[in-house]
Amino acid sequence: MDLREQITKRSIKKRKKFILAEEKIDGDKTLELGCSAAGLSRMLRRGYWVGYDLDEDVVREYSQYLKVPAVVGREKLPFKDESFSSVLMFDFLEHVDEDSLLLRETKRVLKRGGRVIITTPRAGRLFIIKFRNFIGLRKEAYGHKREGYTPDELITMVKKEGFKIKEISLYSGFFVEFLEAIQNAIYFRISRNKKDRRSGNISPVQEEEFKKLKKLLLFQKIAFPFFLLADFIDRIFKTKRHVIFLTGEKE
């Protein structure tokens, strides 16, 4: 098991994302918008798979790691109409300037009956957002153009662009988010100097970044039981959930 897979399997949020998304991916032709570290992508991948991201370095690394084609671009997608049966948008919509245009383009490249699967941070008057800001993790540190969306905002926008909502749910409680914020702050402030930072990458993405961070990954291994405990406490006390999971279908 390589470092990316270790990170994925030690992440409460990525494990939940995998459970929610796995059965909803068609498996014929899939486009992933937002390449990220690709550990989760490897676990989900089947059939024909294409990556797409705003960052050229991330696209190159993603393609080499997964051995799949990947393209760099903006909101306008360079694919033919009805090219894909599934489009994944994991924590990506909040990164783009024109989110409505991206959804419109997503609908265009999806086949009829195809699905878009979206995860995005929940916005609103949330203490965790204030806490992140307090420790220096403002939305710009994550490369976000906006904090996220409220469930109603996301539903309205997805419907407006012509999708039928098939499912919407919330996950990741307060205590998990709190621990993750601390972990991200350690990575952002200590493990990478300003010269090495790439906008919007709050966690390692490239192979050389993973190799530099073996000590931090050991910390993550030690911390994982605490994340499991935090998730348990969140479920017991039914704390507010901070990530939106939405599935829409092109009619």
Image (cartoon, rainbow, N blue to C red):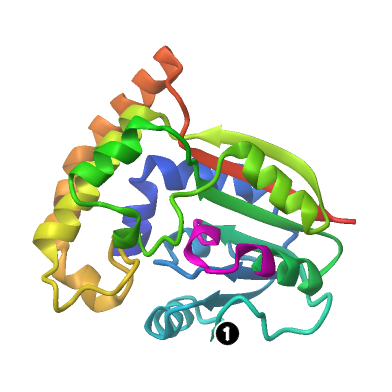
Instruction: Judge whether 106 appears above or below 15 on screen.
Output: below
Q: Left or right: where does residue 170 sit relative to residue 188?
A: right
The image quarter in which residue 5 lies = bottom left
Direction top: furthest residue? 237
| Quarter of the rendering occupied by the C terminus | bottom right
Q: Is residue 93 magenta?
A: yes
* Residue nearest the viewer, comparing 78 with 83: 78
Q: Left or right: where does residue 131 sit relative to residue 151?
A: left
x 51%, y 81%: residue: 67
Q: Left or right: where does residue 53 sit relative to residue 192?
A: right
Instruction: Judge whether 17 appears above or below 7 on screen.
Output: above
x 78%, y 50%: residue: 159
* Residue nearest the viewer, comparing 119 with 158: 158
Instruction: Judge whether 142 appears above or below 18 on screen.
Output: below
The image quarter in which residue 12 lies = top left
Q: Left or right: where does residue 86 sit relative to residue 95?
A: right
Helix, strand, or loop for circle 1? Answer: loop
| Quarter of the rendering occupied by the N terminus | bottom left
Q: Is residue 153 something that shows in the picture?
A: yes
Q: Which residue is mark 1?
A: 69
Q: Is residue 1 something that shows in the picture?
A: no
Q: Amino acid at mark 1?
A: Pro
x 49%, y 49%: residue: 148
How far across and down, in percent of the image, does residue 234 sit? 39, 22
x 35%, y 19%: residue: 233
Highlighted magenta segment, given as a residue range: 91-101
